Image (cartoon, rainbow, N blue to C red):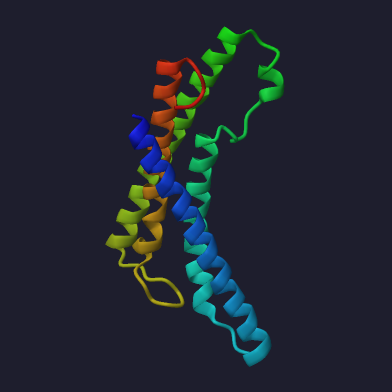
Amino acid sequence: MKILDKIVGKIEDYVCIITLIVMLLLTFANVLSRFVLHFSLSFTEEIVTGLFVIASLSGTSVAVRNRSHLGLDFVIGFMPEKIQKVLATAATILALFMCGILFVYGVLMVRQEIFLDQVSATMQWPEWIYGMTVPVGAAVLILRYLLTLAGQFVNGKEGS
């Protein structure tokens, strides 16, 4: 379990780093092009938008791993430790459920994009390429929450 957690953690870290660097470079190139050449690189906005979804979902997974995701720590902190553990487990199960919904609807969206043969506005790439970021990101989040849930049951603490 710890090996899988480390592998997934490294992948999350590298995905976050690479997507943010590429987003920064593309946006900088577009801004530079607008001011110097008076010409917008419109394709960069399309790619950056797709990368933003990847960065958001992988960043969420990193936040779950580091136990820095949003929570009601102020309210829960005043409760007895047993109740805190029960609420942490319930929150993880609810998050798994939500990620499962995100995954299912992401797959349905990709299926529809393929069926309708949709292409992106600027680059004319198949929309499902961008759409795949949603179910893949949701799958990574599901894996992260499963690792967290396993850690809660095995170690009796929040996290794996």
Q: Quadrant of residue 36?
A: bottom right
Q: Position of residue 84 (x, y in %)?
A: 59, 14
Residues 82 and 3: in front is: 3
Residues 10 and 126: in front is: 10
Residues 118 and 22: in front is: 22
Residues 105 and 130: in front is: 130
Quadrant including the C terminus? top left
- In the displayed structure, 110 sits above or below 96; it is below
2 relative to 39 in the view: left or right: left
66 relative to 98 in the view: left or right: right
Quadrant including the N terminus? top left
Q: How many marks?
A: 0
- In the displayed structure, 118 sits above or below 131; it is below
- In the displayed structure, 151 sits above or below 29; it is above
Q: Position of residue 78 (x, y in %)?
A: 71, 13
- In the displayed structure, 26 sits above or below 34; it is above
Q: Position of residue 4 (x, y in %)?
A: 34, 36
Q: Residue reaching furthest bottom?
A: 37
Residue at x 67%, y 24% (from the top left corner): 73
Q: Position of residue 20 (x, y in %)?
A: 54, 60
Residue at x 54%, y 82% (from the top left corner): 41
